Image (cartoon, rainbow, N blue to C red):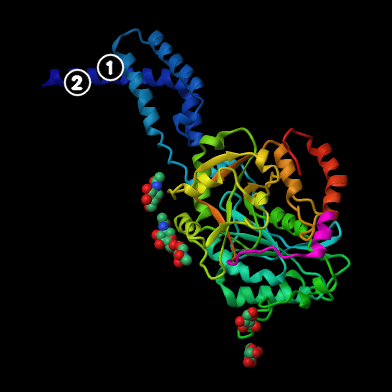
Amino acid sequence: MYNNRKSFIIKLLVIACIIYLCIHVLTNNAGPVIRELQESGRNLAALDSANLEQTALASENAIKEAVPIAEPTKEPEARVQKVSTTVQPEKPLTVLEKVKELTQCLDKTLVPKTQQRGDYWVLYNYVTAEKTFKCHESITYTTHADYSFMDNLVPLLERWRGPVSIAMHAPGTDFANTLESIAYLRDCASSLVREYTTFHIYFSTKHVPKEVPKPNAAFTEPYNCSLTPPFLNVTSDNMYKSQKKLLYPVNVGRNVARETAQTHYILPSDIELYPSPNIIEKFLAMIAENKGPLLSKNPKVFPLHIFEVSANQPVPENKTMLKEMLVNGTALPFHKKLCPGCHSVPKAKEWQMANESKGFHVFHVGKRNGRFIHWEPIFIGTHADPLYDERLSWEGKSDKMTQGYALCVMDYDFLILDNAFLVHKPGIKVYKKDARRAMLAAKTNQLIKKIIFPELKVLYGVKKGCAV
Ligand SMILES: *[C@@H]1O[C@H](CO)[C@@H](O)[C@H](O)[C@H]1NC(C)=O
Ligand SMILES: *[C@@H]1O[C@H](CO)[C@@H](O)[C@H](O)[C@H]1NC(C)=O
Ligand SMILES: *[C@@H]1O[C@H](CO)[C@@H](O)[C@H](O)[C@H]1NC(C)=O
Ligand SMILES: *[C@@H]1O[C@H](CO)[C@@H](O)[C@H](O)[C@H]1NC(C)=O
Ligand SMILES: *[C@@H]1O[C@H](CO)[C@@H](O)[C@H](O)[C@H]1NC(C)=O
């Protein structure tokens, strides 16, 4: 009994001694690694593996030297394993955490400010959305309009369900109607307007409205929702812009809406183009997976296919429904009848044949050259993409061509998404002769050719196969 107990104690002492030695040796050598692990809260896989192997090897050698018995060398190995398992295995990053890590983006606040921009006054963040976003949390649909287009906002929001940044051109007396329209939409139309939409307003320094309330004083009274929406059935004759024969400064609006967007990813679009549902969630999941063409070193944007549907048709809910409508002729590729070259997308036939699949993938990597040299794609991009030339107007056409040239020279990849698309507000556009627009378009072409293009060549350089 006594003997048994004595030998037990001796055994215990020997084991304790060995463990002490091992811990001593280990902490001297692997100590920094373990401490680093504990401080950073990361797991072993996250550390520089070469560094780690070296440290482990060093500690093994040190153990061999310090303890010249065969037995205990096994112990330290067990100990090393134990250390690695006692560090909590890292929880897999969520999609948003991965997007944050991959984009390294910076957050932005929505602060109202009044500023001049060339020949325009801009009321940035004049009416702000109630929901705000960190830069990695969503995609902002950025767009421009005057109040006569505001009937598009609710159908757009119902499909987008994310942040919208909209710059509104509101010269002279159009300003009051613009405020009324915003008030109606926020108070009477849909809660999505207040939640997600941030409005900016701009007008020429030559057409300043008589009265401009301070940003937070514009909507003190609730709107009377029994009144007809101020943006319904507006004829252009009623608008200040038409009475004064002003041009629509589309690119000032585009740039204002883009620059103020809180998120890293943006979808600069036209307000009549409604996105297919669930783009934000599926797009960010694809970004977080970060594989295939996403790993290319080239700068990239993600163009969306655009379609139009007949006036009496619903907007397709998904690609499966869109395909049926293309087959029975109630849907068409956008501007097929007006300007087929402007919007045709590389591998469009194949895209239309392909069945809908789960999530988003890159269907094809295109370039703006060859048959697509004048392509005016609408795409999900980032704040790093070139802006739009503010000298160009909507009436003069070619308003996105200079951006297209810059993208081509900078060797952008156009990563076409397989299950995402835009649909124009129902009603198929037909060609209408417009003498004034034709004259302005000719003038714009001269401006681009003689002045803007030479500038672009200096600023961005030249590349074979690129044109405005
Ligand atoms: C709201 O507008 C309707 C229709 O013009 C009118 O009958 C009603 O009196 C108005 N309500 C208020 C509170 O002004
Ligand atoms: C707007 O115009 C349409 C037809 O052009 C008409 O049916 C509708 O009643 C009008 N709405 C208002 C509020 O005037
Ligand atoms: C596509 O949308 C239609 C209409 O809402 C629906 O019936 C169908 O189940 C949807 N298909 C897929 C694959 O989501
Ligand atoms: C075309 O297909 C769509 C989607 O399936 C359907 O809603 C519509 O009724 C069809 N129209 C015609 C004219 O067949
Ligand atoms: C695409 O979907 C249709 C209808 O569901 C089916 O008949 C066809 O076999 C599918 N095609 C491919 C290539 O999977």
As helix, strand or loop, the secondary structure at mark 2 comes to: helix
On screen, residue 372 above or below 1 = below
The residue carrying mark 2 is 8
Q: Can you say which quadrant of the picture contains the N terminus?
A: top left
Residues drawn in magenta: 426-442
Q: In which quarter of the image is residue 205?
A: bottom right
Residue visible at 65% across and 47% down? 382
Residue 261 lies left or right of residue 206; in this view the side is left
Cα separation, mark 2 vs mark 1, equals: 10 Å
How many discs appear? 2
The residue carrying mark 1 is 14
On screen, residue 22 above or below 205 = above
Question: Dot 2: within a 10 Å radius of its alpha carbon, few (fewer than 14), some, or many (20 or more) residues?
Answer: few
Q: Is residue 218 visible?
A: no
Residue 256 lies left or right of residue 120; in this view the side is left
Nearest to the observer: residue 412 or residue 202: 412
Residue 432 lies left or right of residue 84; in this view the side is right
Q: Can you say which quadrant of the picture contains the C terminus?
A: top right
Q: Quick check: is 421 in the magenta stretch?
A: no
On screen, residue 341 above or below 326 = above
Q: Quick check: is 429 in the magenta stretch?
A: yes
Question: Dot 1: within a 10 Å radius of its alpha carbon, few (fewer than 14), some, or many (20 or more) residues?
Answer: few
Where residue 421 appears, as percent x and y from the top left, is 55, 54
As helix, strand or loop, the secondary structure at mark 1 comes to: helix
Q: Can residue 244 be seen in this view?
A: yes
Nearest to the observer: residue 159 or residue 112: 159
